[in-house]
């Protein structure tokens, strides 16, 4: 896979990286349901074997478990990938997810311990909430960078105005927004701003949490375990579910022309945007990783991109 420089950093990353949200498992508000650690480790090893050179995780995923699984999987690995993690989301005593930007330094130390490393390659503010605390938290992140505990600092889910505010304190290497055919909110302002200002973009949920893989069905959605957050997500409810599955069928037909899945087309569609440096793709086992690896090299033609654009304009927007 060809690599691209991420923002102002020296990180040369592959077009796709492995997202470690689902492999966190655990009983928390945004779990994807039960997850076997051996499957998770196999997925990470397969991703590395197939050429991905970065993993994106966070302490909230499985309440720390995702970071621990990543560390276990990378122990003894010869070609160690970059590891990106985050700060700012915690679980309270009721297991509810809360925003907290007051303990950045402690969160960093905890992540370093769970990841069993001396330095985090990219440290991201998971959400800019509370908004009034982002400057102070960004200042601490900049201190951690100077101390060598993190190599580069980045944002996630930031607006243009928030990116401008923290940029006055220290440069923003990257921003991580959601971006897919179903969620295009960042197209108008955030992506153009990042492209213009040399800020890398790592988009998450390019397949919209599995909806655009081509493998999702109404029956599968109905059978989700109660602790799978998607059971309650709006795009998994009618009438949006039928609309989204029709979109997956449409892009699956485009993929069939090239022998790739709907999911690979969904990933390629996000990478077609020049602002996007890399897309985060999930994989809960080795087979799923194998199914999306073509997203690192397959590219849509301009005509196919326009064809999808027409469909989105008529059916999704």
Image: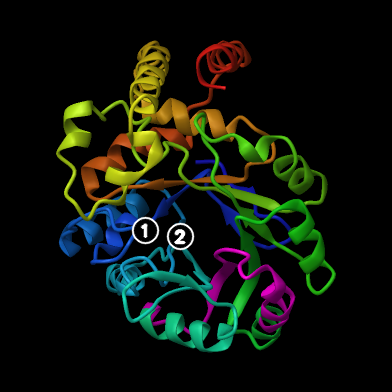
Q: Is residue 292 above or below residue 104?
A: above
Q: Assess whether mark 2 and mark 1 are in contact (beta carbons under 8 angstroms).
A: yes
Q: How crowded is mark 2: few (under 14 residues within 10 Å), some or many (20 or more)?
A: many
The label number, if any, that marks residue 191 in the structure image = none
Residue 308 horizontal/vertical position (percent)? 54, 16
Q: Which of 136 and 93 is in front in this view?
A: 93
Q: Nearer the viewer, residue 45 or 176?
A: 176
- Disc 2: which residue: 56
Task: From the viewer's perspective, tell me whether residue 13 is left or right of residue 132.
Answer: left
* Residue 118 within the magenta-colored segment of the rendering: yes
Residue 248 horizontal/vertical position (percent)? 37, 22
Residue beneath the point at 36% across and 54% down = 48
Tell me where the magenta segment starts and ends, as one range.
115-140
- Disc 1: which residue: 20
Q: Is residue 314 above or below residue 8?
A: above
User: What colour-coding does the image apply?
Assistant: rainbow
Question: In whole angstroms, how far apart are the C-alphas of marks 1 and 2?
Answer: 6 Å
Q: Earlier in the sequence, mark 1 or mark 2?
A: 1
Residue 288 horizontal/vertical position (percent)? 26, 41
* Residue 210 within the magenta-colored segment of the rendering: no
The kind of secondary structure element at disc 2 is strand
Residue beneath the point at 25% across and 51% down = 228
């Amino acid at each position: 896979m060809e690599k691209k420089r991420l923002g102002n950093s020296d990180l040369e990353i592959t077009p796709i990286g492995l997202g470690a949200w689902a492999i966190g498992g655990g009983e928390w508000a945004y779990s994807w349901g039960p997850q076997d650690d051996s499957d998770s480790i196999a997925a990470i090893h397969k991703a590395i074997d197939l050429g991905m050179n970065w993993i994106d995780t966070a302490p909230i995923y499985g309440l720390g478990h995702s970071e621990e699984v990543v560390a276990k999987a990378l122990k003894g690995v010869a070609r160690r990938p970059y590891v990106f993690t985050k700060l700012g989301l915690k679980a309270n005593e009721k297991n509810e997810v809360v925003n907290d930007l007051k303990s950045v330094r402690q969160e960093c130390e905890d992540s370093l311990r769970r990841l069993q490393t001396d330095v985090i390659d990219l440290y991201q503010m998971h959400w800019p909430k509370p908004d009034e605390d982002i400057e102070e938290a960004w200042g601490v992140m900049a201190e951690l960078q100077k101390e060598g505990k993190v190599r580069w600092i980045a944002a996630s889910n930031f607006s243009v105005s928030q990116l401008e505010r923290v940029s006055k304190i220290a440069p923003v290497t990257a921003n991580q927004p959601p971006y897919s055919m179903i969620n295009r909110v960042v197209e108008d302002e955030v992506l153009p701003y990042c492209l213009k200002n040399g800020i890398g973009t790592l988009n998450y949920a390019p397949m919209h949490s599995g909806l655009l893989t081509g493998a999702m069905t109404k029956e599968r959605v109905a059978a989700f375990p109660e602790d799978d957050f998607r059971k309650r997500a709006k795009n998994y409810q009618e009438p949006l579910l039928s609309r989204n599955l029709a979109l997956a069928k449409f892009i699956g037909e485009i993929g069939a022309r090239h022998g790739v899945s709907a999911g690979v087309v969904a990933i390629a569609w996000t990478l077609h945007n020049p602002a996007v440096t890399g897309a985060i793709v999930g994989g809960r086992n080795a087979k799923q990783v194998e199914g999306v690896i073509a997203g690192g090299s397959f590219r849509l033609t301009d005509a196919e991109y326009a064809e999808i654009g027409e469909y989105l304009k008529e059916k999704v927007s």
